[in-house]
């Protein structure tokens, strides 16, 4: 992609969408921020602040709109909507964009029913677009405030990935680029499930040793699943794999970790989210189905899925993991 990206649209005015709009504006790009929800759109336009990220004022250069056609005029579009609604948003956007417009998924998940990753949904619903994925160890509040953050942007076309990384590089927000699309999006989806497991360990008060063991063995699951899906091992070891796992497995800033803490303290999956989206709760059963199809052993992810579904108590899941047959570490 030889064209310099000067105009970026961000679809989704939640915490992460607002943060990415901020960093694109700081990078000197023209930014259009589209928000579907009327109430939040009004707050973004008038108070210059998202309902989901209070206290962070939008850069003056960011234009807020509810007109999808207006947002579609951008040279690149960041799709910052939940994984399970990505299909509907891309379907509405598809007839409005120019050929080869990069559509960058910023959701970390796998679609229910179809088992499709985010870039696969983009390719299916917007065939004239160029699918890409953004993932890595990043909290919206940190990015919005300009704290140092590094992520990975992947597209099958190396030139597109490089152009996107350059366009979003704001100094404190440093994007690396890759062509391993599957590895980048797989790491982001899988780590959400493992972050729930880490939260359960914390909420149950099992100690730092247990948390370290769970995180390490969880990473082994991520690598096994990644290899089965054709991801590169170096990607699994990078920002979107190991990096994101480290970030989300030890802090209540992670919604998935906090969800797990609540489960560990005895709450049900229905109440544990506390009104916040924990993407890993939706990803867990899908991940498990895919792992079975590929004959990949993922006992920690299996335990998380069973706990969320109410099929297994936390204590029973822990006992089942601890009494598994001894084996060589791999």
Image: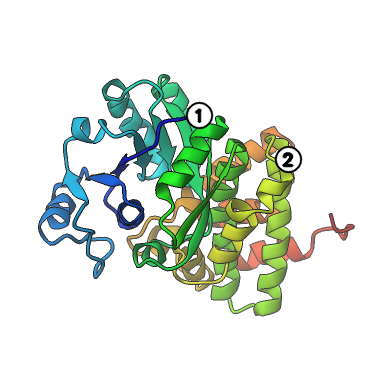
Residue 128 shows in this picture: yes
Q: Residue at x 88, y 57 (%)?
A: 327
Badge 2 local density, few (<14 within 10 Å), some, or many (20+)?
some
Badge 1 local density, few (<14 within 10 Å), some, or many (20+)?
some
Q: Is residue 89 above or below residue 126?
A: below
Q: Residue at x 32, y 58 (%)?
A: 15
Q: Secondary structure at mark 2?
A: helix
Q: Is residue 252 left or right of residue 286?
A: left
How is the protein colored in the picture?
rainbow
* Disc ID at residue 120: 1
Q: Is residue 144 left or right of residue 37?
A: right
Q: Residue at x 42, y 42 (%)?
A: 83
Query: Does the CB distance between marks 1 and 2 fall below 8 Å?
Result: no
Q: Residue at x 69, y 53 (%)?
A: 237
Residue assigned mark 2 = 227
**In front of the other: 198 or 299:** 198
**In front of the other: 240 or 125:** 240
Q: Quadrant of the C terminus?
A: bottom right
- Residue 141's spot in the image, x, y percent? 37, 66
Label 1, label 2: how many angstroms apart (C-alpha)?
A: 18 Å
- Residue 2's spot in the image, x, y percent? 46, 30
Residue 298 shows in this picture: no
Q: Secondary structure at mark 1?
A: helix
Q: Is residue 222 above or below residue 7?
A: below
């Amino acid at each position: 992609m030889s064209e310099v990206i000067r105009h970026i649209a961000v679809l989704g005015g939640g915490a992460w969408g607002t943060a990415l709009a901020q960093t694109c504006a700081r990078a000197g790009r023209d930014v259009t921020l589209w928000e579907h929800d009327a109430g939040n759109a009004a707050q973004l336009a008038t108070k210059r602040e998202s309902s989901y990220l209070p206290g962070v004022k939008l850069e003056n250069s960011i234009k807020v709109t509810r007109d999808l056609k207006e947002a579609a005029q951008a040279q690149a579009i960041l799709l910052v909507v939940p994984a399970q609604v990505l299909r509907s948003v891309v379907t509405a956007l598809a007839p409005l964009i120019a050929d080869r417009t990069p559509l960058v998924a910023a959701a970390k998940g796998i679609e229910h029913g179809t088992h499709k990753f985010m870039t696969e949904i983009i390719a299916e619903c917007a065939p004239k677009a160029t699918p890409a994925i953004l993932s890595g160890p990043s909290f919206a509040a940190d990015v919005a405030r300009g704290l140092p953050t590094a992520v990975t942007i992947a597209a099958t076309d190396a030139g597109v990935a490089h152009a996107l990384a350059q366009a979003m590089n704001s100094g404190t927000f440093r994007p690396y680029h890759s062509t391993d699309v599957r590895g980048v999006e797989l790491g982001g989806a899988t780590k959400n499930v493992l972050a729930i497991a880490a939260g359960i360990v914390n909420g149950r008060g099992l100690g730092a040793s247990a948390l370290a063991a769970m995180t390490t063995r969880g990473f082994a699951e991520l690598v096994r699943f990644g290899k089965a899906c054709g991801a590169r091992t170096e990607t699994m070891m990078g920002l979107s794999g190991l990096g994101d796992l480290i970030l989300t497995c030890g802090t209540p800033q992670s919604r998935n970790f906090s969800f797990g803490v609540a489960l560990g303290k005895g709450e049900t999956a229905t109440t544990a989210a506390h009104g916040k989206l924990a993407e890993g709760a939706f990803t867990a059963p899908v991940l498990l189905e895919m792992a079975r199809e590929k004959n990949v052993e993922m006992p920690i992810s299996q335990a998380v899925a069973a706990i969320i579904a109410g099929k297994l108590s936390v204590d029973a899941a822990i006992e089942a993991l601890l009494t598994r047959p001894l084996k060589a570490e791999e």
